[in-house]
Image (spheres, grey):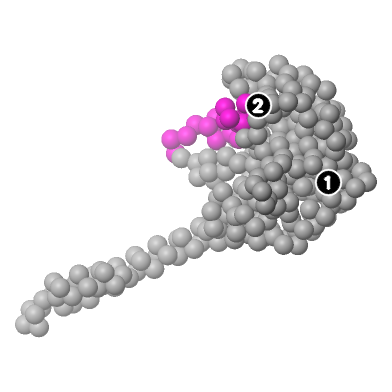
Amino acid sequence: MAIIYRLLERVKPSPTTHTQLPLRWLLIILNTVFVSLCAIVIINDFLYKPLMHKWIYMNQSQIFGSYEDLEPLDDILQAERQPSRRDSIFFHETSGEWKKLAFPSIYQSVDERINYAHLTFRQACAIESAALHNRKSDVFVLFAASRYMDAAIRNESRFKVLLHYKNVHFRNVHLWSYTLNTPGYAWLKKDEVFMSSFYVHRYFVSHISDFLRFMTLWRFGGTYLDTDTITLKSLELLPPNYAGIESKFNVAAGVINFSPDGFGHQLAEKCLIYFLKNYKYNEWNTNDAIS
């Protein structure tokens, strides 16, 4: 606004002219536009984005229309095949495709607004490498927002390859039921995590991922891998309770294994509690309880 005022000062007419009134109205209009834009940004960031994030990640039903072959992924807690305590490998996909759902275009078809299961080629490679080298372990790909599959998705090259592995399972995670009767339930009810969307969307995605990896290992034990982690050898012979190395000074939270009971469960609980107590929604990389 200071720049606009300086420009207008340069073209300010002489006192002898009769154009000062229109100039004053021009300044009023510019001020009104500026204040309106600021209000829109504040409402969008403080109210709309957090509410949309909560709706997408907390609500199970997001079907926009009726499709005969459209099916939701099984819920991780209700599916017949449950993670085995100790031997399971977990990947979390937390992006949620929220922009597509929160800001639907008038040019989008109903089909384009369905939250289909989606994986990048890099993610698919990471999952396949874990399944290939760990045949005796179940590999669970957990989606943090309700996802759907149909015949077209199953025939995509990425899913088609992964579905050939009998030990790969795709599951939905409903955050309320997943955290019920756990240390994470009260923290989730505070809605603090959804405020991270005010800063940067990647904060929110990262924070949900940080939370869920510790929540999952607290629940089941086993191994968590980031979706960009390529497995070159079997993990099945490694002793429990380990983590990856990021540098000489830092342990990486992208590779974690905890046993489901005893010392391993105690470690998982300490990591989860540390995350919940020290969570900062406005910072990206300070919520890691491992490093």
The dot on residue 218 is 1
Q: Amino acid at mark 2?
A: Met
Residue stretch rendered in magenta on the structure: 106-126
Q: Residue at x 49, y 63 (%)?
A: 42
Residue at x 54% of width, y 58% of height: 199
Residue 45 visible, this orientation: yes
Indicate the position of residue 253 as horizontal and vertical percent values: 70, 46
Total numbered circles: 2
**Location of mark 2 (residue):** 149
Q: Nearer the viewer, residue 168 or 130?
A: 130
Q: Amino acid at mark 1?
A: Trp
| Residue 284: x %, y % from top left | 60, 55
At a point 68% along the width and 24% down the height, the residue shown is 128
Residue 83: image quadrant is: top right
Closer to the camera: disc 1 or disc 2?
1
Earlier sequence position, callout 1 versus callout 2: 2
Q: Nearer the viewer, residue 2 or 98?
A: 2
Q: Is residue 98 left or right of residue 42?
A: right
Q: CA distance from mark 1 to mark 2?
A: 28 Å
**Element carrying mark 1:** helix
- Mark 1 vs 2: CB contact within 8 A: no
Residue extending furthest right?
262
Q: Position of residue 230 (x, y in %)?
A: 65, 30
